[in-house]
Each structure stands twice: as C-alpha cells, then as structure tokens.
Image: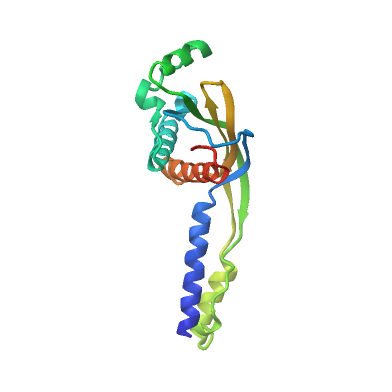
Amino acid sequence: MKKYFITIFFICITSFIFLACADVKITHSWKADTPQANKFNKIMVVGLFTNKDRGLREQMENHLQGDLQELGFNAVSSMKLYGPTSFEQMNENALLSKIEVDGVDALLTIVLLDRKKEKHYVPGRVYFSPFYSYHHRFGPYWGVMYERIYSPGYYQTQTKYFWESNIYDLKTKQLVYSVQTESFDPDEASALAHRYGKVIINDMKQKNVLQ
C-alpha cells in the first residue's frame, strides 16, 4: 500500500509539472535555410504592445533578455535602453538608424496578435481515489460520495492569447526565425513571460537558430 501511494504521489507531481509548462504552446515555427547558425553581436528584444499592455511588454522583454543572457548572448531590452515610448511615430529608417548606432545587429520582436475569450464547462468533483481510504466505514464513504456527486459544475471563461516572435538580421534586413504560440490566462504577467521565454529559447536551440 505504501508503494501505491508513492506511485500516485509521483504521478501527481509529474502531472503538475507538465501542466505548468504547457501554458505556452508552439503552434508553428520556421527557420531560414542557412548553412549555419546566425552569429549576432547584440540582440535587442522589442515588444510591440499597446500602452495598456505596457506592464506585460516589460515583463516579456525582461525575461527573454535574461534567457538569452543565460546562454551567453549579449541581449538588451528596448524599454530599458530607450524607454517605453521611444519608437512611437518613428518610421523604419529612423528606427534602424537609431539602434544600429548602439551596435544592435539583430531584433527579436514579441507581438500579441490576438486574444479571444473562451468559455469552458468545469464538471463537479468527479475523480478517482483508492476505495480503501474511505470504503470500509459508512460515514467516510457517505461524505466522500455525497460531495463528489452533488458538487455542482460551473462555467469558466478564459482568455486565449496568440503570440508571434521574429528574429531579423539587421545586416541583411531579412527574417531568420519566426514562431507562433498560444497561451491561456496567466496567473500573473511574470509567470507568462517566464514560460514564454523558456519555450521560445528552447525552440531556437533545437533549430540551431543562434550561434
């Protein structure tokens, strides 16, 4: 019996870890057909968000910058370098001139493409538990079964987010990598930014995008 409970415990822990990492899912990714990985001296992370999402933009930029730095890349956040409104009302040539002066030779963009609300039905408390934990006495059996059967279900509304990130080589002005993802409501912005960064960086490593 002890061995059984240990097995159940590890199954629960594994399921929890899987669900925590599954909040951000890649739906499509692409890498330019180049003979070797791209080598950049300075990568700037740029979030293209509305002003009302400025806090989320800051979190996303910071986490992606940190994830790249952990791998040894020289990465900077556009908000830290230029502030939140520096690129507003600026055309492409002016933007490129501004960042190339600071030695930036690659851009990693983060764009919130869309968000949609979805309604899901969450059923009542229907779950499996070992019968010997409550079955031998009527009181515990009644309590468990009553709660399981009569706990009502409910509708839950979640927001699904659709993201896109691209890497542009500023020397050639060409796209070298693109990835689209989707995610549901984060518990907090920093949690979403952390998970997004890890998923994106892992995909880049697998595709040998950066040298």
Let me know if residue 48 appears in the view.
Answer: no
Q: Quadrant of residue 31?
A: top right
Q: Nearer the viewer, residue 207 or 196?
A: 207
Residue at position x 61%, y 60% in the image: 123
Q: Position of residue 89 (x, y in %)?
A: 48, 12
How many marks on residues? 0
Q: Is residue 153 above or below residue 62?
A: below
Q: Nearer the viewer, residue 185 or 73?
A: 73
Does 115 sit left or right of 134 as displayed?
A: right
Q: Position of residue 1 (x, y in %)?
A: 48, 85
Residue at position x 45%, y 83% in the image: 2
Residue at position x 58%, y 40% in the image: 181
Does 143 sit left or right of 71 as displayed?
A: right
Residue at position x 48%, y 59% in the image: 17
Q: Quadrant of residue 34?
A: top right
Q: Is residue 93 above or below residue 74?
A: above
Q: Position of residue 18 (x, y in %)?
A: 52, 58
